[in-house]
Image: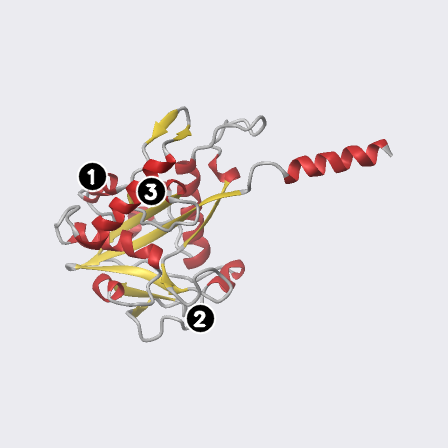
Amino acid sequence: SGCLVLVRARAMARSKGKPKHIGSCGIYVCVTNGSTPWLLIHRRSKQVSEPRQLASPGGIVERSFCLPPGTPTWGGGEIDFDYGARKTAVQELREETGIELDESGQAALEELPVGPGAYWGAAFHRNYCLRLDGEFPEVRGPEKASLHEVIRGGMDGIGEPAGDGFHAWVSLDELLARPDLMNGCRVPLEHIWQLASGEGEGGGAAADADAAAGADQEEQGEVQMQGSKRPLSGGGAVADATWKRARGSVGGMLG
């Protein structure tokens, strides 16, 4: 019938629409205890990509998350990937670790560089860092819907237990020395190391990766977001500028 044809046509139109998933993000909780940075890490399960690798929380950014309040959802409204990636990172942190950030904690997130090899490309991946001074936040552990993503006991014998059975606080030097660190985590962590040790952008593997990412991004050009063009850089300059700010306290940033 005519109604059935119309329903099928609409279904086909939806199936050919814009993709639901458009990028990815990672979030690094870094506690500076003395002169040593400690990172909150888990081991990825076999049910996700790059299984059994050590990684920070993170996830996939959905297109719907990239529409700030007031953005029209019809007619292909302009997305704000930075807005969506930050929102997703905060959500993933809560779902995977139980750590909730209040508005000040979300505002304090600092952007870190993106290395080569991101699934959606460096233009559509963001790494964020939450720095805390001295105090380790309570880690309640993953929500039920996120249990399949991480391995219980996967961090046994590595770093210091975070208390939930899934995560551990691992010193940055130990983490960078491990061969089972997920490749996508290496560049942002090396950048944290450079900044924490006062080397600035410096050289080494992180700088090489930044350069490679920059070359890849030049080929992609610039992405139009929220009426302005954002240069597709690795984020090193952003991280350098913000790392010098005073670190926050657990009580002042967590919900």
Residue type, numbered disc 2: Arg
Residue type, numbered disc 1: Ala
Q: Is residue 202 above or below residue 171?
A: above
* CA distance for labels 1 and 3: 23 Å
Q: Are marks 2 and 3 in contact (CB under 8 Å)?
A: no
Query: Which badge, 1 or 2, comes first in the chain's sequence?
Result: 2
Which residue sits furthest right? 1
Secondary structure of residue under mark 1: helix
Q: Which mark is residue 216?
A: 3
Q: Residue at x 71, y 38 (%)?
A: 11
Residue type, numbered disc 3: Asp
* CA distance for labels 1 and 2: 37 Å
Which residue sits furthest bottom? 157
Labels in figure, total: 3
Q: Position of residue 115 (x, y in %)?
A: 31, 49
Secondary structure of residue under mark 2: loop
Q: Residue at x 43, y 49 (%)?
A: 119
Q: Position of residue 144 (x, y in %)?
A: 53, 61
Asked if one can make out residue 110 in the rendered structure from this viewpoint, the answer is: no
Q: Is residue 242 above or below residue 197?
A: above
- The residue under label 2 is 152
Q: Which mark is residue 241?
A: 1
Query: Which badge, 1 or 3, comes first in the chain's sequence?
Result: 3
Q: Quadrant of the N terminus?
A: top right
Q: Are marks 1 and 3 in contact (CB under 8 Å)?
A: no
Secondary structure of residue under mark 3: helix
* CA distance for labels 2 and 3: 37 Å
Q: Is residue 48 above or below residue 65?
A: below
Asked if one can make out residue 243 in the rendered structure from this viewpoint, the answer is: yes
Q: Residues within 10 Å of mark 3 (few under 14, many from 20)?
A: some
